Amino acid sequence: MLTKYLCMFFLGLMLLVISNLQAATIHVPDNYKTIQEAVKNASPRDTIIVHEGYYTENIIITKPLTIESTKGSDASIIHAAVQNEPVLKINNVNEVSISGFTVTGSQSAGIYLYNSHNGQLRGNKVVNNGSGIVLISSNNNTFVNNTANLNEQYGIYLELSNNNILEKNIVNSNKDKGIFLSSSSYNELINNNVNLNAWNGITLWSSHNNLLKDNNILRNRYGIVLSDSNNNILTNNSTWSNIYAILPIVLIYIGILLYLVQKHLLRFI
């Protein structure tokens, strides 16, 4: 019996070593000219290294891969070739990691996750899209140090997505809302900067048991908005709502100006 268990142990160990040896590193554009071509030809758990450049393409990822740039988001830019499709679509897959890209030019979404779990987005700039980062039915993902600015709708949008971590992201100047959680629970939003968005900074809609901690939510139309959302923990967030902070000051100056105009008109008369 002991011999049987030892054989099973060594067989499992050998399979693990073989699987690790099979993981390859692919370079773009050295091995493949486009990122999508590299993704298509990669095996699960391969790493794709993308060198600096401007890539015009839409990328669909359906296998666990690590895709990272060599010189960061300012040097590696992915622009949508088909504007009504996401630039990066992560579809029905676990453990995808994307880091160090500027993602732009989609009327749909910059990075779109559907039914995809345990992934990571780090150090990406997702700007000038319909929405920045979108999660649908995707759980246990981690987003750290991303920028989601200047999108037409949402900076970051979660729907039916639970147990995700959003930490140290910048979500500024989006034309609708900054971070929006819809029917999404047990998420952690920690130390994010959510500023200058046209409407709400952070919105929780039918979303429960989320943690909002140490976020800066400044100069949005409204700071944090909760609707039909229970048992959420909000601690040490900085909120300053633009319209209510600035408008009274503007009215004071208008009042002073009108007073001075009237005073000088009466003196003239």
Image: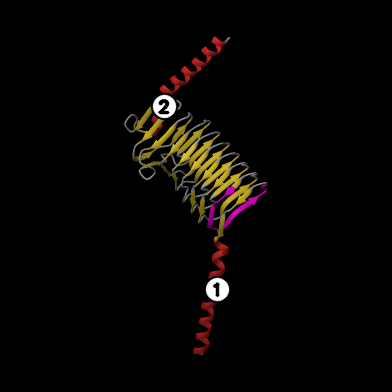
Callout 2: helix, strand or loop? loop
* Count of numbered circles in the view: 2
Q: From the image, give the main secondary structure of the stretch colored magenta.
A: strand
Nearer-N-terminus badge (2/1): 2
Callout 1: helix, strand or loop? helix
Confirm whether the magenta stretch covers residue 227: yes
From which residue to which does the magenta span run?
Answer: 212-230
Q: Please give the name of the residue rendered at 59% of the width and 48% of the height, measured from the top-left corner.
A: 212
Frontmost residue, 262 versus 224: 224
Which numbered marker is on residue 171?
none
| Residue at image mark 1 | 252
- Badge 2 crowding class, 10 Å Cα cut-off, few under 14, some 14 to 19, many 20 or more, is some
Name the kind of residue labelled 2 in the image. Ala
Q: Quadrant of residue 163?
A: top right
Judged left or right of residue 33, residue 268 is right
Estimate the x, y position of residue 3 in percent, counting from the top left.
54, 10
Estimate the x, y position of residue 259 in percent, counting from the top left.
54, 80
Judged left or right of residue 189, residue 67 is left
Judged left or right of residue 255, residue 38 is left
